[in-house]
Image (cartoon, coloured by chain):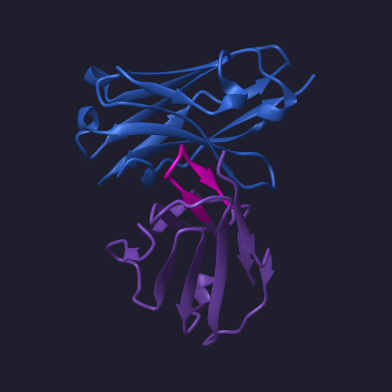
Amino acid sequence: EVQLVETGGGLVQPGGSLRLSCVASGFTFRDSWMSWVRQAPGKGLEWVANIKEDGSERYYVGSVKGRFTISRDNAKNSLYLQVNSLTVDDTAVYYCARDVAHGVFDVWGQGTTVSVSS
Amino acid sequence: DTQMTQSPSTLSAYVGDRVTITCRASQSISNWLAWYQQKRGKAPKLVIQKVSNLESGVPSRFSGSGSGTEFTLTINGLQPDDFATYYCQQYSTSKTFGQGTKVE
């Protein structure tokens, strides 16, 4: 079964940091671009970042550049998102997704919730 | 950035209805458009990619059309399982989603 499982969310104060993780199974992770997509409470979807199969290319949405870092460990079938300098606007469910066809998300995890509040 | 605008934001319909959702791009995205279905508390599910290519397992009552800047998602014969929020997404330049259309 193709599956993505995210962990690492939580409640953090403004300015704080978290590391989100996503473990993949059921497909060849090392052959897949991967993305993080987030959804603020009651809001729509926002693509956050993606990373090439070998980690050599990484792209970010403008609002997180310089604060978030996407990375991967193909030996562990794992994707990561280091989120720093968090603001209340970063409060969201963060989804890990397989990124195919140059930008289509065909497999999604269940999401992990990041809440930024003082 | 390419902005995606969906209409309507909310759509009231009955089982059996034909439902159409429109998505407009702020600039041409050729045919780089996908549609997702999201139910409350769940992750989105890919329904259609490249305007009209139905994902495996998606019922044939779903269809997509359009090109350039205007696109539509049509559900022919709405079923109880189809009540959800639908998002369009462009992947021509980076990736951006529409604001969603809730089918209730």
Name the outermost residue toward the right.
A118
Tally of marks: 0
Residue drawn at 32 percent across, 65 percent down: B54
Q: Is residue A44 visible?
A: yes
Residue B72 percent location from the top left of the image: 50, 69
Residue B34 percent location from the top left of the image: 42, 55
Q: Nearer the viewer, residue B90 or A50?
A: B90
Residue B80 percent location from the top left of the image: 52, 77
Q: Is residue B84 visible?
A: no
Residue drawn at 31 percent across, 61 percent down: B55
Residue B10 percent location from the top left of the image: 68, 67
Residue A116 in the image: above or below residue B76 = above
Residue drawn at 62 percent across, 25 percent down: A63
B67 drawn magenta: no
Name the outermost residue toward the bottom.
B16
B92 drawn magenta: yes
On the image, which quarter does residue A78 sit in? top left
Q: The chain drawn purple is chain what?
A: B
Left or right: where does residue B2 sit relative to residue B55? Answer: right
Q: Nearer the viewer, residue B5 or B82?
A: B5
Residue drawn at 60 percent across, 84 percent down: B14
Residue A45 in the image: above or below residue B100 = above
On the image, which quarter does residue B31 sit in? bottom left
Left or right: where does residue A78 sit relative to residue B6? Answer: left
Residue stretch rendered in magenta on the structure: B88-98
What color does chain A have in the rendering? blue
| Quadrant of the frame with the C terminus of chain A | top right
